[in-house]
Image: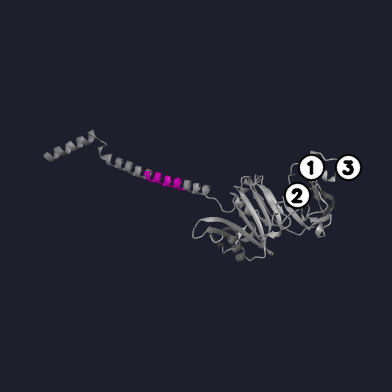
Amino acid sequence: MDTLQETETIDNLIKENPKSEYKSPSRLMLIVGGIILLVLGLVVGYYLSSSSKAQTSYQTTSSPIPSPEAGDEMEGWKTYSNKEYGFEFEYPGDLEIHLSNSQDPPINDIVYLVVISSKDYSEDITVRIFQGYDLEEYVTKVESELFGLDARFEINTSDTLIGEYSGKRVDYYYSDSPQKIFSMFIFFRSDFIYEITSRSGNRDQILSTFKFVDKAQELSTVSGKLCYPSEYLPQGNIVAKDIETKELFTQKYPGSDNGGKSTFDMELPEGTYIFRYEAGVNENKPDEFLAGYYTQCATITDRGCLDTEHQLIQVQVSNQSVAESISLCDFYYGAEPDF
């Protein structure tokens, strides 16, 4: 009897709550669905995060080799070309050529020197050319010349590709110190050593433009006369300066007391030049001399010379024409002409 009543009670409960037996399956499905969504969210988040990191890494990684886009950064750059020793390179347009000179006779065995720098010398490119040294002799010489015994050097044993050419890299350090003083890059060509140093932030790009060019070229002869406000002509130098490259060509003059004539001939490569006669040069004081320039005043013989006529005359030299009558006779200027 009790069993029958219990059965009826259960039936009545089921009728009053017809969905109660389905509560557990519904909750389970919600939990499983939540887990699935959570897992999918984690997977998608990980993928997006990885993709973002990969993109950031790509954007901030720089190539050690100048990329094609570097051409935009090099817009406005100038080209330095040396006709005598057959090389050229590009450099930022805001830098200036401060010195370009063939050393005759060689100074400290340097046969050629060019310095291109900013006005405050915070950035510079220097090319020095030596002759008659092997690599170790040359590096030891520079070490002794610049730093005495207070520096050491390390030569990169493997060749360094600089632009299109294989060269050497030499790093200089303070003795017993990891602190690097500077690096230089050198090339060997024929009997010459070409040394390049730079303190420019564009050093690698400058080096990538360095190349050798054919030195073979025709020279043209220019001729003229020398003057001096005295009865004799002192020993000195006849100097021609290429106004585009700032390169100096120097010819020794022995002086009239040592057989020198009052006329001269000089061979020059094609270019546009200005001229002067450095009279009275002393080997012990090479910067002390009296200069006679080729100006309009130097050609005037029938009247006095105006201040505006002390401007230097530019001479075009080519293999199709011969420049003559270059009179290095203007010693009477007020302010020294800008040579």
Q: Does the magenta stretch include residue 150?
A: no
Residue 249 as seen in the image, left or right of residue 209? right
Residue type (three-letter) at the residue carrying disc 2: Leu
User: Distance of mark 2 from mark 1, alpha carbons?
Assistant: 15 Å
Where does residue 207 sit, x and y in percent of width and height? 63, 54
- Using the image, tell me which numbered label, if any, was put on residue 302: 3
Residue under the point 75% across and 49% down: 290
Give the residue drawn at x 60%, y 49%: 202
Query: Which mark, residue 75?
Result: none
Residue range in magenta is 38-50
Label 2, residues with CA under 10 Å away: few <14, some 14-19, many ≥20? some
Q: How is the image coloured?
A: one colour
Front residue of 48 and 244: 244
| Residue 321 visible | no
Q: Are marks 2 and 1 in contact (CB under 8 Å)?
A: no
Residue at mark 2:
290
Q: In the image, what residue type sits under mark 3? A: Asp
Residue 310 marker: 1
